[in-house]
Amino acid sequence: MTLKNDRFLRALRREPVDATPVWLMRQAGRYLPEYRATRAQAGSFMGLATNPELACEVTLQPLRRYELDAAILFSDILTIPDAMGLGLSFAEGEGPRFAKPVRTHADIEKLFVPDMGKELRYVMDAVSLIRKELHGSVPLIGFSGSPWTLACYMIEGGGSDNFSKIKSMALNDAPALHRLLGIVTDAVIAYLAAQRAAGAQALQIFDTWGGMLAPHMYREFSLRYLQRIAAELPRGEGVDKTPLILFGKGNAPYLEELADTGAEGLGVDWLVSLEEARRRTQGKVALQGNLDPVTLYADPDGIRREVKRTLDSYGKGPGHIFNLGHGMSPDMNPDHVKVLVDAVHEFSRN
């Protein structure tokens, strides 16, 4: 099926577009009243994420409101460790928790690559259904957490202020952590390949916690596994190649190395200008970002001003996908999102 709107994929290939494409991390989420209603119907976050029909519904909700240039699968980055049997749950107001965190050699040896057609079938069914329901309107993005970010939650047992448990393992038993990261990387590759087979037309990896590592530790425990995924994930060839985007909070020090991975796109946060990121990556990759999400708390004039500033920072020429530098928050005004999306297209239209 020919896409009616292929700006996003063209930008990832660094081809000319009529206007800068835009999508937003967490564009399907709690800031939308229709999302909250659907989640209530599901009974829980995991009830929503594991129901392909409801996951499809919330994926499509923001596209009914806004002229977005891509849809992203509604799911969670922690589906892989949950499928490994670690017992994922979400307590209201507390974030994710694992009943069986990974702390010992014995715990690591129990890990396995889930069967994508069994333990994670609900994700692939959602991808297939979303792709069908989009009717070729915009591309569908599949995603995964990075091996390092997934390992953070698996070892800590949930979120953390300082990630002391995983950093202690890195310092005291690096071979054990590499063993864990190797298994998780195998699972991420299989997971993204299965999403691609189910219909995802682009893939993104969220390295949410890579940026809190010291440089030598980032290169050892995060970057090397991103490099492996980019090299080993089967994505096709030529114009039919499924593009890969690497996003990381705090990844600015490593832009040159990330641009050399073979990924088509880099997502960057708001702590580096697009002008600098473009100069340093030398046209090797498309750049995605990088408006500070708190801009959505500004009034409409302020939002439009910051959108223009972000577009001007990238400058003329292909290879820019407009996005936030991180995800949206639940208390953001849906009307402000429309202002942002419309401003991107208005100011960038050729």
Image (cartoon, rainbow, N blue to C red):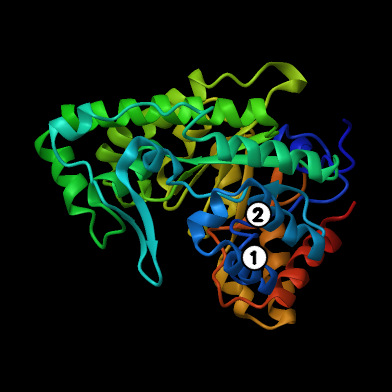
- Which residue: 82% across, 56% down? 348
- Which residue: 30% across, 55% down? 158
- Residue 79 tag number: none
Dot 1 falls on a residue whose secondary structure is helix
Let me know if residue 302 appears in the view: yes
- Which residue: 74% across, 80% down? 300
On the image, the x and y values in percent for residue 288 come to 62, 48
On the image, the x and y values in percent for residue 315 come to 72, 51
On the image, the x and y values in percent for residue 33 come to 67, 74
Q: Residue 195 vs residue 4: left or right?
A: left
Q: Residue 19 vs residue 228: left or right?
A: right
Q: Residue 84 vs residue 35: left or right?
A: left
Q: Are marks 2 and 1 in contact (CB under 8 Å)?
A: yes
- Which residue: 54% across, 48% down? 50
Tell which circle, 2 or 1, labels the residue nearer the N-terminal end.
Answer: 1
> As rendered, which of 246 and 54 lies closer to the eye?
54
Judging by the rendered image, the residue that carries numbered circle 1 is 38
Rendered position, 273 above or below 297? above
Q: What residue type is labelled 1?
A: Thr
Q: Which amino acid does label 2 sit on?
A: Leu
> As rendered, which of 218 and 200 lies closer to the eye?
200
> As rendered, which of 235 and 158 lies closer to the eye?
158
To which quarter of the image does residue 134 belong?
A: top right
Q: How crowded is mark 1: few (under 14 residues within 10 Å), some or many (20 or more)?
A: some
Judging by the rendered image, the residue that carries numbered circle 2 is 54
